[in-house]
Structure formats: structure tokens, C-alpha cells
Image (tube, rainbow, N blue to C red):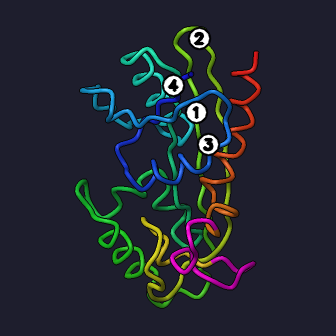
Amino acid sequence: MRKIVLATGNADKVREMRRLFADLPASEVVPASELGPLPEVVEDGETLAENALKKAREIAAACGELCVADDTGLEVDALDGAPGIYAARYAGADASYQDNCVKLLAEMEGVVERRACFRTVMAVVDPSTGFEKTVDGLLEGSILEAARGDRGFGYDPVFYVPALDRGLAEMTIDEKNQISHRALAARAMAELLGEYLAQ
């Protein structure tokens, strides 16, 4: 049984990822938090890929297991791509999901062109072989004028998906896992890991 360590302390992400990696053969998906004290990774990269790789490398080196990490950004056209890589701490270092959504809605007040996209970059590092790879997923949509729905997390309540005529927070986790940026990146990662682990 091969451990796949998720380099995140976010319980919502762990829940999603366990579902998305459920079909990987002979593997056990474990959040890094279950392995005891591990280093706190400073996300100081200039891109999503740099941050994802840095997290995967540092946690993999610390625990000696194959590690998967991701970084997600929300890119809003009217804000010149902001909040981008700073999405999780847009309203401050200790901001809650709601704090970030409130700040984004305030900055978008009166803006007509509300196009946006979610982008997730996922990285895998195997310290035993030196194998490293990144994949990404993209979800295009727009920013709602007010929060809608009570599901999901992060910016889900303010992100609208035109193709489904619903916000992300109005979808079940299974519906979201069909179309979300993280789901698309995770499916690409699951395919990559399936091939890699079968070698």
C-alpha cells in the first residue's frame, strides 16, 4: 500500500481530494497533519506552480513519502488578475472565507464586466526517485453580485458557472467535483499517479 501524502491542513480540500483519488490502486491518501509535526511551508513563490512544487518538495523531504500539493488562485479580469496567488489571504493573513468574499464583493461593486477564473496547479514529488511533475485545472466563470448558496468553501459562494447557471456554493460536492478547477487538476493528477505507481 503506497501512501500519498496531501500537503494541506485544509480539511475541506482533504475531503475533496480523498474522493477524487478514491480509485487509485494500492494507495492510501493521508493528510500531512496525520504524520506528526512537519515544517510550515512559506508560500513565497511568484506563481501557483512554484508554490505547489515548494510545498510538495518540503513535505515530501520531511516525511519521506510521495507527496501531492496544490495551489489555487482566483483571477478576476476587472482586478487585473487579483487576488491571484493571494486568494487565500486576500483580506489579510488570518482572513476567513467570508472575509475574503466580502472584500472581493466590495471591490467589484458597480463593476459590469465580472469575468473570472479559478486555476489550480497540483504538484507531485516522490523523494525516493526524484520524480516531480505539475498539472493544472481551469474553471471559467464570473463573480456574482452577492453570495449565493451554502455549500462549498472559499470563494464558492461568489463564483458563478454560466454553463450550469449556478454558483459553486449551490452545487453538491459531487456536482462540483465534475467541473471544478481542483477536480480537473486532481483527475489529471490521478491519471498521472496511476501510470507512475503502475511502473
The kind of secondary structure element at disc 1 is strand
Amino acid beneath label 3: Phe
Please identify the residue farthest to the top as the structure is shown.
129
The answer to whether mark 1 and mark 3 are in CB contact below 8 A is: no
The answer to whether mark 1 and mark 2 are in CB contact below 8 A is: no
| Region in magenta | 161-174
Tell me which label, 2 or 3, sits earlier in the chain.
Answer: 3
Amino acid beneath label 4: Lys
The answer to whether mark 2 and mark 4 are in CB contact below 8 A is: no
Q: Is residue 138 magenta?
A: no
Name the front one of labels 1 and 4.
Answer: 4
Tell me which label, 1 or 2, sits earlier in the chain.
Answer: 1
- The label shown at residue 123 is 1
The image position of residue 13, as x and y in percent, is 46, 51
The kind of secondary structure element at disc 4 is strand
Q: CA distance from mark 1 to mark 3?
A: 14 Å
- The label shown at residue 68 is none
